[in-house]
Image (cartoon, coloured by chain):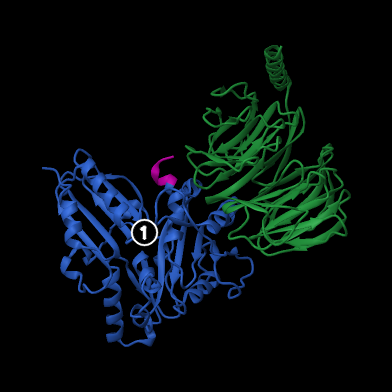
Amino acid sequence: MNADEELQDKVPVTVLTGFLGAGKTTLLNYILTENHGKRIAVIENEFGEIGIDDALVINAEEEIFEMNNGCICCTVRGDLIRILGNLMRRRDRFDQILIETTGLADPAPVAQTFFVDEEMKAQLRLDAIVTVVDAKHLIEHLDDHKPDGVENEAIEQLAFADRILLNKVDLVTPEERAEVERRIREINAIAPIIESTHAKVDLDRILDVGAFDLDRVLIGDPEFLDPEAEHQHDLSVTSVGIEIAGEVDQDRINAWLGQLLMEKGTDIFRSKGILAVAGWPQRYVFQGVHMLMDGKADRPWGPDELRSSRLVFIGRNLDRAELEQGFRACLTG
Amino acid sequence: MADFAGVLALDPQRELAICGSLSGEAALVSVSTGQTVTRLVEHPFGASCAAWSPDGRMCAVGGHDSRTRIYDREGSLIRVLELTGWVAALAWSPMSNALAVAAGRRLTLLGDVAWPEHHFEPLQSTITDLAWSENAKRIGATCYGGVHWYDPEVLGDLPHRTYPWKGSLLSLVISPTGKWACAGAQDSSIHLWKLWSGDDLSMSGYPSKIEHLAFRGDGLWMASACVEELTLWDFSGRGPKGSTPAVGRCHERHIEVMEWMPGGQILATGGADGKVVLWPSPRKQRQELAPVAVVEGAEAVASLAWVDSGSLVVGRQDGRWERLSFDASINAAIDATADARGHRQKAKSARRN
C-alpha cells in the first residue's frame, strides 16, 4: 500500500469546538439531517439535544488523562480512545467521524489523543479542528477577563482551529464582521474563515479537508508570514510565521525544535512547517500540537523551485525575534 | 450474527457458549452442534462482555446499554441490573457466589443472598477491567490512577486498598499463585504489584498500549500481546524482574484476543490479520517461539475460546462463528511441553536430593 492509499484507508476525524451558544449543536443537527450522502459517526458530549434515528451517535463523558511519558502538557481523552476503538469495529457503517467537544473544552487533549495512541494512528487520521464562533458575541468572549491561571477557552479554541466557521453573520453589520475577522486573525492567522448563518455550510469545506494532512501543510497560507500582519502585541495568544530562504541543517533544526517544544510546548498550541533540509531532495513537513510532533518527507523540490523553509507557531507569549533568531541559527553555511 | 462477534464465553463444562456481537444480539449456543439453544435479550448499542459462573449454573451478559442480565443455563432471565455507562467487565467470584460488574466509574457487586446489590462509590475514572483474587477475598478494578482493591465481605463505600499508578491502566490479571497483580497500561508498559508486599515494578519497552494479558494456569508464565507481537514473562521464583521474555512473532496485524488451553500447554492468539495462531508454552526465557499451527482467515478475529485440547471456537469481525479443530501437530507440541515440565520437575527433585 502506498502513502496515498494508506491515507485514504484511514478514517478522517473532524473535531468540532466552539464556545457555548456559538452554533455547534445547530451545525451537528444540520450535518445529521442534511441529505449530503456522507455516512458520519458522531461522538457528542452534551446529552439530549440530538435524537436522530439510524444515525450512529454516541455520547461521551470527557475523561482527560495525563500521559505518563514525561511530557508535561501531554493529556489525552481516555474516553475517546475507548469509544473510537469500539467504533472502528463497525468500520463498514460510516466513512467519517465527527467529535463534538464541550463549549468549555480545551481542544488539545482531543488532538493529542491522535498522536499518542498507536492503534488510533494506524486506523484514523485527524482531519481538522473546526471551531464555530458566534459573530455577534465572539469579541465579548475574547475580551472576557479570566482570573490568573484560568484559560480563556474562546481564545484557545480559535488558536487550535484549522477551519473557523464564523456563524450568525446575519446578526452583525459589515463593519462588525470585519472587526470580528480582524480579531480572529490576531490569534489565528492561517485558518480559513468560512461565514455562515444558522450554521449552514458546504460540508466539503469543513469535513475531510485534510488540514492535518502533512502533504497539505501551509498550502494556501495567507498573510501570516508577514511580520507586519501581527497587528497587536498586547495579546498573549498570537500567530508567528517565519519564512527563510536557504537550507537548514538537519541536526541543528532537530535540536532547536526539540528544545523549543520541550521548553515552550505548553505555550505553543500549534506548530506547522515545511523545511528545506540540506542533503534532502524532498521537502520535510511537520505538524505539532503542544509538545507532540508528527513529520515526514514530502514531495521532491522542483528543479527551479526556491528552497526555503517556512514555520508557523500559534501560541501564548510568542517572541517573534527569538523564534526567528533560533530558526536562522539552523541555516547551513 | 450481523456484526463483530466479540463476546464469547464457554461454560466450565464446555457445552454451552454465550455468543454476542456489537449489533447487540446475544444467544446461548450448543458448542457441540453450533445450534442456537436460546436467544437472549438484545443489548441496544452492542453486547460488550459475558461470563459464566465457575459452577456453570449461571451466566451474565453486559452491554453498551448499561444493562447486565443474569440467566440460568436454560437462558431464563433471573435478573437485570441497570447502571450508568458501558458495562466494561463482568467477573464472577471463584466461589460463584458473587458477580462484580464494572460500568462507567462504578463497581457494583451482586451477592448470592437474595441477590442484594452493593454499589461502591464511583472512582475517578472509568473502570477498564476486573479480576478476583484466587481465594475470592478481594476484587481488583483498574482505571486511570491505579488498581483498586475491594473487600467483598466488608463492602463499605471505598476500596479496601489502592495500588496507585500515574497512568491509564487498561487490563488486569491476578496470578493464579495469588502473588501478583499485573496491569497493562496505555503508556506502553505493564505495571506489576507484589501483593504480599505492595512493592511494584514496571516492564516497559513495548511499542504500544497493552490490552491483553493472560497467566498460564500454573502462574509460571504470563503472556502479553502488544500490536502484532506476543511476549511471555517468566513468573517462576522471584518473578520477572531483570528477566528477558520469550517472544512469538507471526501475526501481521494487532493481536485482538488470546487464551491459554486448559492445562496450559498451548496459547491461542487471534489477530486483526484474520490468523489464529497456536503457540507452544515457552521452555525458557529469551526463547523465540515457533507457532505450532496457523489458521488463516479473511476476517479479523474478534473472540476465541478453547473447547478442548483439539479445538477452538472463534468469532470473526463479520459476525461469523466457527469451530477450528487441530490435528496431531498440536498433540506433539502438548507432549513436548509435558516432557519439558517433567524434565524440569525431575531436575528440581534431583537438586533437592
Instruction: Name the foreground residue: B223 vs B202.
Output: B202
Chain identity for the colour blue used in the image: A
Quarter that holds the C terminus of chain B: top right
**What secondary structure predominates along the stretch shown in magenta?**
helix
Tell me: residue B216, above or below residue A23.
above
* Amino acid carrying mark 1 in the image: Ala
Q: Is residue A71 visible?
A: yes
Residue assigned mark 1: A211
Asked whether, in this view, residue B65 is left or right of residue B225, the answer is right
Which quarter of the picture shows residue B287?
Answer: top right
Image coords of residue B29 (percent x, y) = 81, 45
Q: Could you tell whether B251 is left or right of A319 in the image? A: right
Chain B, hue in figure: green
Report the front residue among B234 and A234: B234
Q: Can residue B257 be seen in this view?
A: no
Q: Residue at x 34, y 78 (%)?
A: A142
Q: Position of residue B279 (x, y in %)?
A: 64, 27
**Camera-side residue: A97 or B304?**
B304
Figure quadrant of residue A189: bottom left
Place of residue A284 in the rendered image (x, y in percent of width and height, measured from the top left):
27, 46
Q: Position of residue A158 (x, y in %)?
A: 36, 70
The magenta-colored residue range is A1-6
Chain of the residue where label 1 is placed in the rendered structure: A
